Image (cartoon, rainbow, N blue to C red):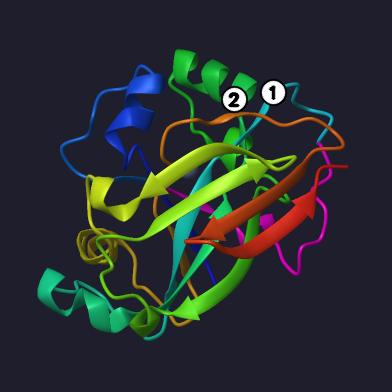
């Protein structure tokens, strides 16, 4: 399986990164070795001194598709979850400066904790899903899909122009504003609505 992550999909986050709001979706990949499942801890890597949390809603692809039309995109994902797109911000800054690829900063082992999923039919409106992240019980990021620059369907259709989507692939749909550093000992919890879907510790 593969993990596709959408960058700058919330305008306020693009702003806090001093990045332009994109005119088409920006995306990158992580390998399956980035996943952390079952609330297992994240081990702070020794190659970075500035690991940032980015909480994101995640789509789970449920059938293979290529060149999917936007109006049919909803048929290609059936579950929605929540995860963290951990980013080595210090390394990313160097990569950006030199125009190098981002993988070292974004795709390292453990950079994609993933929580529970719910069937998308349980949501009344996919364009009004609220979610948030707490660090040590304090809310640090809060988002709602009504603020997405590119909707779930737009993202699925766009990505499928370049990559065949396969069952089990995950799409991290972008982070709202409020990204920030984590330190060893922090306890992170991610919620969809009021429901805790992911909880783990930084070790
Ligand atoms: Zn992200």
- The crowding category of the residue bearing disc 1, from other C-alpha atoms within 10 Å (few below 14, some 14 to 19, many at least 20), is some
User: Mark 2 falls on what kind of element?
Assistant: helix
Percent coordinates x, y for residue 47 in the rendering:
78, 27
Percent coordinates x, y for residue 178 in the rendering:
49, 30
State if disc 1 and disc 2 touch (CB < 8 Å): yes
Would residue 31 appear left or right of 186 to someone viewing this image?
Answer: left
Q: Quadrant of the C terminus?
A: top right
Q: Quadrant of the N terminus?
A: bottom right
User: Mark 1 falls on what kind of element?
Assistant: loop
Is 191 placed above or below 106 here? below
Q: Nearer the viewer, residue 69 or 12?
A: 12
- The crowding category of the residue bearing disc 2, from other C-alpha atoms within 10 Å (few below 14, some 14 to 19, many at least 20), is some
Q: Which mark is residue 89?
A: 2
Is 191 placed above or below 85 here? below
Residue for badge 1? 50
Percent coordinates x, y for residue 129 in the rendering:
35, 61
Would residue 143 appear left or right of 47 to someone viewing this image?
Answer: left
Based on the picture, tell me whether residue 154 belongs to the magenta stretch: no
Write the start and end of the magenta stretch as one range: 28-44
Q: Quadrant of residue 71?
A: bottom left
Q: Residue at x 25, y 23 (%)?
A: 20
Percent coordinates x, y for residue 127 in the rendering:
24, 61
Q: Quadrant of residue 13?
A: top left
Based on the picture, tell me whether residue 29 belongs to the magenta stretch: yes
């Amino acid at each position: 399986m593969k993990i596709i992550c959408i960058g700058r999909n919330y305008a306020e986050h693009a702003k806090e990164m001093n990045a332009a709001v994109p005119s088409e979706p920006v995306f990158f990949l992580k390998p399956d070795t980035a996943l952390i499942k079952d609330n297992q801890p994240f081990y702070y890597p020794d190659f970075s001194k500035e690991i940032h949390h980015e909480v994101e809603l995640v789509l789970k692809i449920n059938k293979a598709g290529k060149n999917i039309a936007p109006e049919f995109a909803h048929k290609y994902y059936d579950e929605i979850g929540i995860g963290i797109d951990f980013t080595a911000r210090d390394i990313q800054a160097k990569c950006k400066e030199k125009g190098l690829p981002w993988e070292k900063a974004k795709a390292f082992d453990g950079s994609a904790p993933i929580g529970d999923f719910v069937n998308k039919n349980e949501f009344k409106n996919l364009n009004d899903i609220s979610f948030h992240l707490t660090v040590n019980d304090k809310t640090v990021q809060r988002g709602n899909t009504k603020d997405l620059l590119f909707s779930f369907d737009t993202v699925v259709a766009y990505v499928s122009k370049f990559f065949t989507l396969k069952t089990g692939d995950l799409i991290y749909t972008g982070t709202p504003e409020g990204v920030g550093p984590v330190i060893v000992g922090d306890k992170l919890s991610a919620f969809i609505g009021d429901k805790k879907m992911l909880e783990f510790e930084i070790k």
